[in-house]
Amino acid sequence: MSGPKLAGEVLPGGGDWQVILPGGLTSIEARYFLKVADGTVIEVTNPGVRTAAPEVIEKLAKGENVDPSAYYFRTTPRFSVKAGPHEWLRRQVFVARGIRKPDSVVIDFYSVE
């Protein structure tokens, strides 16, 4: 993971839970840990939703590559981190856009100013 204010890696062992609901709605909750360049470990709780037409959901379920403009995938991440240089993460609100790849998920985080 990398960005203008933070760089590091997603640690193994996190998890995500999805509840697939009628009408193309998927409720998502992911929990995982980031280890940033200075060694700080940050806990991430990332709830959200993904919506799509039935044919798009079918392609995603099959692991096919789908253009992100074909579905809506947004989350509202929260960060737990000890006091120090990354404490700013607890003092801002974030939204994120998810992109479902065949073998992974890419999440772009944005601070709401």
Image: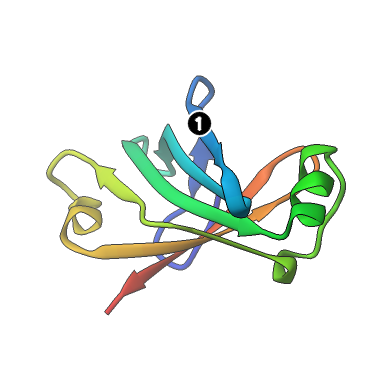
Outermost residue toward the front in this view = 22
Of residue 16 and residue 24, the one placed in the foreground of this image is: 24
Instruction: Kindly identify which residue carries mark 1.
Output: 16
Give the quadrant of the C terminus.
Answer: bottom left
Image check: 59 left or right of 94? right
Residue 103, relative to residue 95: is it above or below?
above
Few, some or many C-alpha atoms within 10 Å of disc 1 (few <14, some 14-19, many ≥20)? Answer: few
Of residue 89 and residue 17, the one placed in the foreground of this image is: 17
At x 54%, y 23%, the residue is: 12
Rendering coords of residue 44 (x, y %): 35, 40
At x 28%, y 46%, the residue is: 79
Image check: 31 left or right of 17? left
What's the residue type where badge 1 is placed? Asp
Outermost residue toward the left in this view = 83
Residue 72 occupies which quadrant of the picture? bottom right
Residue 113, relative to residue 10: is it above or below?
below
Image check: 39 left or right of 57? left
Outermost residue toward the bottom in this view = 113
| Element carrying mark 1 | strand
Rendering coords of residue 83 (x, y %): 12, 44
